[in-house]
């Protein structure tokens, strides 16, 4: 037997083995990496949704789902808008300074158009879903209730703009998602890049 080693052949076999291993690793990793990419359903859950509000009556509320959370669209009456000022002295954050919302919602109505309130129907305390209690007064909430949303789980109260009352467990106002008016009767929730109609 010869103790002479063919170095050229050894380098060729080492390179071929390394290349085969690298190609195999890429093929093995491809499905794993592809599993990290969100599927079409997951993408759709986060996508903006278009909502028809043309048939929403004054004083009524429409409930839809976006990103797995309830979105409430309330068409406020002039009386409901008038009640906003009466609730202001009792609110924790009346100017919406510490709330999650687009910049356009830093007003008493917390809306692009005062007539329409768009909020996530999730209490900012522990994530329960408050009840609409629009009528004022409502003795099931309190004798001086100005109208709004009431969370029966822990007693949090919000006015008709989703602003939280003082002295309740909820730490902040209801969240206003980004949205835009596509027309007089259509809202796009999840994007405020479109100019309002």
Image (cartoon, grey):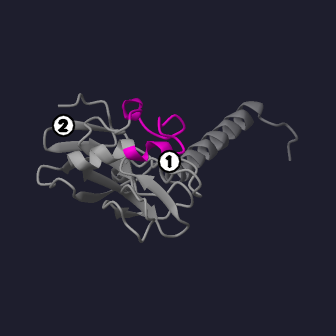
Q: Is residue 154 above or below residue 1?
A: below
Q: Residue at x 85, y 42 (%)?
A: 2
Pointer 2: what residue?
182
Q: Residues within 10 Å of mark 1 (few under 14, many from 20)?
A: some
Which of marks 1 and 2 precedes in the sequence?
1
Q: Position of residue 22 (x, y in %)?
A: 61, 42
Magenta: main secondary structure? loop
Q: Can residue 69 be seen at all in this image of the molecule?
A: no
Left or right of 126 in this view: 57? left
**Nearer to the camera, 26 or 179:** 179
Q: How many marks?
A: 2
**Residue depicted at x 48% and y 37%:** 96
- Name the side, left or right, on which 49 lies relative to 37: left
Q: Residue 161: horizontal and vertical position, in percent?
A: 37, 46
Query: Foreground: 32 or 4?
Result: 32
Comparing 14 with 78, the one in front is 78
Q: To which residue does mark 1 refer?
A: 90
Splitting the image into 4 quarters, where does residue 135 fall?
bottom left
Q: Residues within 10 Å of mark 2 (few under 14, many from 20)?
A: some
- Residue 189 x, y percent position in the rendering: 30, 44
Helix, strand or loop status at disc 1: helix
């Amino acid at each position: 037997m010869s103790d002479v080693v063919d170095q050229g052949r050894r380098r060729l076999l080492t390179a071929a083995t390394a290349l085969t291993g690298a190609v195999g690793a890429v093929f093995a990793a491809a499905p794993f990496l592809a599993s990290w990419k969100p599927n079409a359903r997951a993408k759709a859950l986060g996508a903006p949704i278009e909502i028809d509000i043309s048939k929403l009556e004054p004083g009524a509320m429409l409930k839809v789902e976006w990103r797995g959370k309830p979105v409430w669209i309330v068409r406020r009456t002039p009386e409901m808008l008038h009640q906003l000022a009466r609730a202001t002295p009792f609110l924790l954050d009346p100017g919406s300074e510490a709330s999650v919302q687009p910049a356009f919602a830093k007003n008493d109505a917390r809306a692009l158009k005062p007539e329409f309130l768009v909020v996530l129907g999730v209490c900012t305390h522990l994530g329960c879903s408050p009840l609409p209690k629009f009528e004022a007064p409502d003795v099931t909430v309190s004798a001086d209730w100005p109208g709004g949303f009431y969370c029966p789980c822990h007693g949090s109260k919000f006015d008709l703009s989703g602003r939280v009352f003082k002295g309740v467990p909820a730490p902040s106002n209801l969240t206003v998602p980004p949205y835009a008016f596509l027309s007089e009767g259509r809202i796009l929730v999840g994007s405020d890049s479109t100019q309002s109609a």
